[in-house]
Amino acid sequence: MDVYTYSMETDVSRRQPADSLFELPCACQNLRRLTRVITRIYDQELRKAGLEITQFGLLTALAATGEASQKRLSAGFAMDSTTLTRTLGLLRKQGWVQVKRGKDRRERLFSLTRAGKRQMVKAQPYWELAEQKLRRELGDARWKQMKETVSRVTEAAMAA
């Protein structure tokens, strides 16, 4: 059994990137840090179109599904319902998403408005720039491997 603690001696200079990131002992901390770094890259580009990556992700999901309930969106993104409510509220306020009642009176169905579709078209080139930045750094083979690994790790984590 391997046990990792912050006090374990390691050759930090050999393992840490040049920018002196802390060596973190668990998958969760490492993935959260990675997510923050990648989110900054996408947000930096998408802000030029007045969006952040969480908003762009919801717009693209609604474009793909046509309409979706909050429950479906929450499951599809593995996102907390409270966070989703806040983001959907911002998109509705901007006029990019509309809502209607579903078959069940409690169910609400979300879909893109024309303005939301235009916003996606406006943001798409900035999203592509963020993708290109990462892909260029990783290279095509590692890019493909990263996407496959992320998918497998997500499935494993959901099953755990």
Image: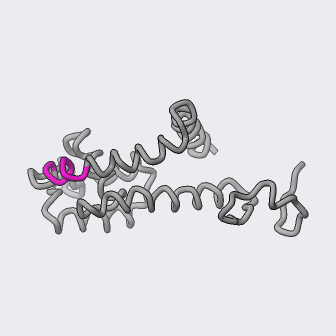
Considering depth in this image, is 110 or 43 the residue closer to the camera? 43
Q: In the picture provided, is 7 more to the left or to the right than 152? A: right
Image quarter for residue 67? Answer: top left
Q: Residue at x 27, y 50 (%)?
A: 69
Above or below — where is 142 with respect to 67? above
Q: Is residue 82 left or right of residue 31?
A: left
Q: Is residue 113 above or below residue 92?
A: above
Give whichever of 33, 77 is nearer the camera: 33
The colour scheme of the drawn protein is: one colour
Position in image of residue 45 (x %, y %): 34, 58
Start-end of magenta stretch: 117-123
What is the x, y in percent for residue 43? Answer: 37, 61
Which of the image's four quarters has the C terminus? top right
- Residue 119's spot in the image, x, y percent? 17, 54
Q: Residue drawn 25% across and 39% down?
A: 64
Please say whether residue 2 is one of the residues in the magenta stretch.
Answer: no
Q: How many marks?
A: 0
- Considering the whole magenta stretch, tell me its main secondary structure: helix
Please give the name of the residue rendered at 24% of the width and 46% of the height, measured from the top-left corner.
62
Identified at 27% across, 62% down, the residue is: 48
Percent from the top left, x then y, of residue 85?
Answer: 31, 64
